[in-house]
């Protein structure tokens, strides 16, 4: 009897020992896997941060390169047109082709890492400027007419243009403190800083996407550069033109660019077509610099707006994003 009890006791002790050992093994395995995961995560975070830093430096260098090109173009003076060096896009190229022969750069040092750079400079004055709609707190009639013609051409709701124009007037007035006193419960729209934010002024998402290739949003009023504008934009800003007239002017300038507005009048072939400095030009002050850097599976994009006054080319806005997600830079 006693021997049977002792046997059962030993079996129970052995079972408890085995169970304890199994629990210890599970605990150790859990701790080990946790430590391994944390180490892997730290390595991934470090690699991502390194790639982000490298991308930032490369894209900053690309922006400086674009500013240099625009500065050299300003040295030549004259009109801005699509056959100039700044207008030639940089097709996707392996980054190592831009690096020094000694390959001391961190990106070049890793032969297994694939990095490609591409870019483009866009004339922002080839588009209608939303800021032109309201000048001195009042709606600018010629600019409103140009946008009305563009909305009609693109078959967009005219009511959205009216709402956007009035909200822009209120937003500008609120930002300068010069507008009328609104009721306490009235919601004053914010002044947008980019095209996507025009939704704040009442434009729908489909309308914004349709307008995107033809409009811009700059800090000051700007004329349209007839040397770089699309036929749609030229049609919109030249009241005497129909679409065929705008397309003929685009075809003519592809052969010989316009040095003055008088050249535009000659090329247009229409005596009633009026080109005035407040609405039209042949030169540009504002450009957008786009750069894309692809490192392995990560693609970083940056858009910068630069303002050129004489030989001075300064950056006034920068936005950077990964895989389509953009973030404003200070």
Image: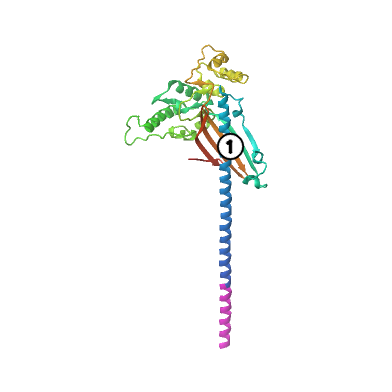
The colour scheme is: rainbow
Q: Taken as a whole, is the magenta stretch helix, strand or loop?
A: helix
Disc 1 crowd, CA 10 A, few/some/many (<14, 14-19, 20+): many
Q: Position of residue 286 (x, y in %)?
A: 51, 29
User: From the viewer's perspective, is residue 94 above or below residue 248?
Assistant: below
Magenta segment range? 1-20
Do we see residue 7 in this rendering?
yes
Q: Quadrant of the N terminus?
A: bottom right
Rendered image quadrant of residue 116: top right
Q: Residue furthest top?
A: 271
Q: Nearer the viewer, residue 236 or 57?
A: 57
Q: Position of residue 49 (x, y in %)?
A: 56, 48
Q: Residue at x 57, y 39 (%)?
A: 59
Determine the secondary structure under disc 1.
helix
Q: Which residue is mark 1?
A: 62
Q: Nearer the viewer, residue 329 or 147?
A: 329
Do we see residue 113 in this rendering?
no
Q: Residue at x 58, y 15 (%)?
A: 267
Rendered image quadrant of residue 191: top left
94 left or right of 306 in image: right
User: From the viewer's perspective, is residue 52 above or below residue 238?
Assistant: below
User: From the viewer's perspective, is residue 13 above or below residue 101?
Assistant: below
Q: Is residue 88 magenta?
A: no
Q: Residue at x 58, y 63 (%)?
A: 32
Q: Position of residue 241 (x, y in %)?
A: 53, 17
């Amino acid at each position: 009897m006693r021997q049977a009890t002792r046997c059962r006791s030993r079996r129970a002790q052995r079972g408890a020992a085995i169970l304890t050992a199994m629990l210890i093994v599970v605990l150790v395995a859990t701790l080990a896997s946790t430590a391994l995961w944390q180490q892997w995560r730290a390595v991934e975070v470090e690699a991502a941060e390194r790639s982000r830093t490298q991308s930032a430096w490369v894209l900053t260098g690309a922006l400086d390169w674009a500013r240099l090109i625009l500065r050299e173009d300003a040295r030549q003076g004259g009109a801005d047109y699509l056959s100039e060096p700044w207008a030639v896009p940089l097709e996707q190229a392996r980054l190592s082709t831009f690096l020094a022969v000694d390959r001391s750069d961190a990106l070049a040092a890793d032969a297994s890492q694939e990095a490609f750079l591409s870019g483009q400079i866009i004339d922002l004055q080839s588009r209608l400027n939303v800021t032109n709609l309201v000048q001195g707190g009042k709606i600018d009639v010629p600019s409103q007419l140009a946008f009305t013609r563009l909305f009609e051409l693109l078959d967009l709701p005219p009511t959205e243009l009216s709402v956007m124009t009035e909200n822009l007037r209120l937003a500008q007035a609120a930002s300068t403190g010069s507008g009328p006193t609104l009721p306490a419960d009235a919601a004053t729209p914010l002044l947008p800083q980019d095209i996507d934010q025009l939704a704040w002024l009442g434009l729908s998402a489909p309308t914004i996407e349709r307008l995107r290739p033809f409009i811009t949003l700059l800090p000051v009023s700007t004329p349209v550069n007839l040397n770089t504008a699309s036929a749609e934009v030229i049609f919109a800003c030249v009241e005497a033109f129909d679409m065929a007239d705008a397309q003929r002017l685009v075809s003519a300038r592809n052969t010989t660019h316009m040095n003055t507005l008088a050249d535009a009048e000659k090329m247009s072939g229409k005596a009633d077509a009026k080109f005035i400095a407040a609405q039209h030009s042949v030169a540009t002050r504002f450009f957008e610099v786009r750069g894309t850097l692809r490192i392995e599976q990560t693609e970083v994009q940056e858009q910068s707006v630069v303002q050129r006054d004489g030989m001075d080319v300064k950056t006034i806005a920068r936005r950077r994003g990964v895989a389509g997600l953009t973030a404003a830079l200070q």
